[in-house]
Amino acid sequence: MLINGEWKKSADGKTTSVLDPSNNQPIAEVERGNRDDARAAVDAAKQALQSTDWREIDPSKRGRMLYKMANIVRENSDELAKLETLNVGKPLRESKGDVAWAARTFEYFGEGRRLEFRWEMFNMFNTPQFGLPQNDISNAAAGRISTLAGDPRVMQFALKFSF
């Protein structure tokens, strides 16, 4: 598994087989992560988020890096599509479309786009609590439960990535 830019074995050394769903035959053996591995990955992600390494790269250079990634995906599209088909059992034509979409996504964000994701749950009366101005995604409180409106079943979550 890839944690903090390094390929690592699972903390307990366990692996698991990835099976071709069409015939139940193994196509790969991969590390089987556990709680310690998840903690290491979360810690590495927190460090990366707090680091200025990515943020201080000139935006045009970041864009070129993402375009380069799109090109790498396209150059390997046949192999990636075959692996996706083996892994999930979908038709090769669909896997090729997925790989092309992945390459285009790198290009899209290489153009300076922003990714915003919002997830919300509503109470039993379907009353949204997410659209309140004080809960705007640009607010520092975004991603925290900021209002429960007297109903503990109302939750909100927001992520924003700027490239």
Image: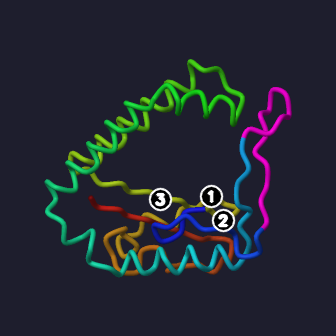
Label 2 crowd (10 A; few <14 / some 14-19 / many >=20): some
Q: CA distance from mark 3 to mark 1?
A: 16 Å
Query: Which quadrant of the rendered structure holds the C terminus?
Result: bottom left
Decide if residue 31 is on the left or right side of residue 42: right
Residue 117 x %, y %: 44, 57
Q: CA distance from mark 3 to mark 2?
A: 17 Å
Q: Are marks 3 and 1 in contact (CB under 8 Å)?
A: no
Q: Are marks 1 and 2 in contact (CB under 8 Å)?
A: yes
Residue under label 1: 126
The magenta segment is 14-27
Residue 39 x %, y %: 62, 79
Viewer-nearest of labels 3 and 1? 3
Q: Quadrant of residue 72?
A: top left
On residue 123, which mark appears? 2
Residue 26 part of the magenta segment: yes
Q: Amino acid at mark 1?
A: Asn
Residue 133 x %, y %: 35, 70
On residue 118, which mark appears? 3
Decide if residue 21 is on the left or right side of residue 141: right
Label 1 crowd (10 A; few <14 / some 14-19 / many >=20): few
Pick whichever of labels 3 and 1 is earlier in the sequence: 3
Q: Give the residue at x 83% y 34%.
A: 25
Decide which of 121, 79 is in the foreground and name it. 79
Q: CA distance from mark 1 to mark 2?
A: 5 Å
Decide if residue 80 is on the left or right side of residue 31: left
Label 3 crowd (10 A; few <14 / some 14-19 / many >=20): few
Decide which of 16, 56 is in the foreground and name it. 16
Pick whichever of labels 3 and 2 is earlier in the sequence: 3
Q: Circle 2 — which element?
A: loop
Residue 123 x %, y %: 66, 65
